[in-house]
Image (tube, rainbow, N blue to C red):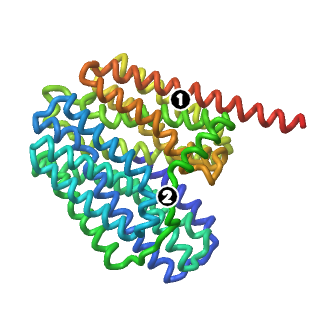
């Protein structure tokens, strides 16, 4: 955590030195308002992360039942995620942000009943909420920022503070969840999460203007255009497949980290919130390492090899030595660092190599193999020992490395052709 704090401080200092655009009182008020809402939404989300699996297990469900609950939430997020942007553009982004607050509040309330069908409905609400939190709030902010005539350069300042704040909130949420679970049981963090989620909706309802986007949704055209791009552009194909393979293993890890660390003796007492906070600190550290790499003149095309080798090594060690719980924990921390590097790295690569007009369609299209991978693993997980699951994750990371190698081959071939021409 000390390393994370040092690198994050250096990032903030450099951002401050580079900020040349004057910030008006009106902009600062707008930015504070957005950050309050954004961080309340994510606080409600992060509070639930450490104890979802543990709560279901405490209610007496086996790994197969829990896997089906995760699959239901994952599927709902996939379906709603495909439509979320268009829904918000048509209905109004403020209304959809309030819908997020209501849906996620409802999802938390369902956790209070030890009833499989109620919990399944809660997973659907949670999947809907997850699909909204990553799209609608940002869409509202960017549109409102532009509508109010603020300088475009100030968007990066808001994004930077939101990212930093989200990382800090995630770490704090793990500690708050730990205290709530110690005091009220595994359902405690979900009860606490009700307060920031409801407050988020109230602030939006009382202080935000409504804004809209394109009122036309044409999913068929979007996907057909995306399919045409990947048939014609091998760089997009391999980049997307590499991302899908990494994220498939990552979402499998989200399900597996709790049973991988717990034993029959420790599963009721393991400090899941503190562990989750350590994961989030490592993820922030990874993000800061990415910035440091760029500051040291690393080309962004070189960084994914570090990410994928970290993924292969960490998952491979767990597959080979899953009974050594402290070593498993250290490997999870290393993997979280790789995740922290992964998101900004692949985001940058997408901005360079994926056409802007096809980005949404391509991103949704590449979620198909990722979702297929996760669903198949979770359906079969009750029949597989923990080492076998992490061996599959190791293969997925090796596949991601292979795809990235093919991607760099296409890119280098293009550069060589352009040079010779």
Camera sees residue 334: no
Q: From the viewer's perspective, is the residue at label 2 or at label 1 nearer?
A: 2
Q: Nearest the camera: 280 or 224?
A: 224
420 over 88 or under it: above or below? above
Gap between marks 2 and 1 measured at Cα: 32 Å
- First in sequence: mark 2 vs mark 1: 2
Crowding near the residue tagged with mark 1, few <14, some 14–19, many ≥20 C-alpha atoms within 10 Å: many
> Picture quarter containing residue 42?
bottom left
In the picture as drawn, the residue positioned furthest to the right comes out as 421
Q: Which residue is mark 1?
A: 400
Q: Is residue 3 left or right of residue 205?
A: right
Q: Position of residue 143 (x, y in %)?
A: 52, 70
In the picture as drawn, the residue positioned furthest to the bottom comes out as 25
Secondary element under disc 2, as helix, strand or loop, is loop
Q: Which residue lies at the image location 40% right of the left edge and 53% below the top edge? A: 167
Q: Nearest the camera: 216 or 40?
A: 216
Q: Which mark is residue 2?
A: none
Q: Nearest the camera: 69 or 319?
A: 69
Q: Which residue is mark 2?
A: 217
Q: Position of residue 321 (x, y in %)?
A: 33, 18
Crowding near the residue tagged with mark 2, few <14, some 14–19, many ≥20 C-alpha atoms within 10 Å: some
Secondary element under disc 1, as helix, strand or loop, is helix
């Amino acid at each position: 955590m000390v390393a994370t704090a040092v690198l994050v401080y250096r990032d903030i200092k450099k951002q401050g030195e580079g900020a040349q655009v004057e910030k008006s009182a009106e902009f600062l008020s707008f930015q504070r308002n957005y950050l309050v809402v954004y961080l309340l939404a994510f606080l409600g989300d992060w509070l639930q992360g450490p104890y979802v699996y543990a709560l279901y297990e405490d209610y007496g469900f086996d790994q197969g039942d829990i896997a089906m609950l995760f699959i239901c939430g994952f599927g709902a997020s996939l379906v709603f995620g495909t439509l979320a942007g268009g829904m918000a553009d048509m209905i109004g982004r403020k209304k959809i942000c309030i819908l997020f607050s209501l849906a996620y509040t409802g999802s938390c309330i369902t956790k209070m009943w030890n009833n499989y069908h109620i919990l399944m409905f809660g997973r659907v609400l949670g999947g809907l909420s997850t699909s909204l939190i990553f799209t609608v709030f940002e869409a509202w902010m960017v549109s409102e920022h532009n509508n109010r005539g603020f300088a475009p350069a100030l968007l990066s300042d808001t994004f930077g503070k939101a990212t930093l704040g989200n990382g800090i909130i995630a770490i704090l949420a793990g500690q708050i969840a730990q205290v709530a679970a110690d005091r009220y049981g595994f359902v405690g963090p979900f009860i606490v999460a009700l307060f920031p989620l409801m407050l988020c909706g109230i602030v939006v309802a009382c202080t935000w203007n409504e804004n809209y986007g394109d009122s036309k949704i044409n999913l068929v055209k979007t996907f057909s255009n995306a399919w045409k791009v990947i048939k014609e552009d091998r760089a997009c194909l391999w980049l997307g497949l590499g991302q899908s393979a990494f994220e498939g293993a990552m979402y499998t890890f989200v399900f597996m980290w709790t049973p991988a660390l717990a034993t029959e003796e420790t599963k009721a007492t393991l400090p899941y919130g503190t562990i989750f906070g350590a994961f989030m600190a490592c993820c922030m550290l990874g993000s800061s390492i990415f910035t440091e790499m760029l500051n040291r003149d690393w080309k962004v095309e070189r960084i994914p090899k570090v990410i994928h080798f970290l993924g292969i090594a960490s998952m491979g060690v767990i597959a080979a030595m899953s009974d050594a719980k402290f070593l498993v924990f250290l490997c999870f921390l290393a993997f979280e660092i790789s995740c922290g590097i992964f998101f900004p790295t692949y985001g940058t690569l997408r901005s360079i190599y994926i056409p802007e007009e096809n980005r949404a369609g391509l991103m949704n299209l590449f979620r198909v193999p990722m979702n297929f991978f996760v669903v198949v693993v979770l359906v079969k997980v009750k029949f597989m020992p923990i080492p076998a699951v992490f061996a599959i994750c190791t293969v997925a990371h090796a596949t991601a490395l292979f795809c990235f190698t093919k991607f760099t081959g296409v890119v280098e071939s293009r550069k060589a052709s352009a040079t010779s021409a």
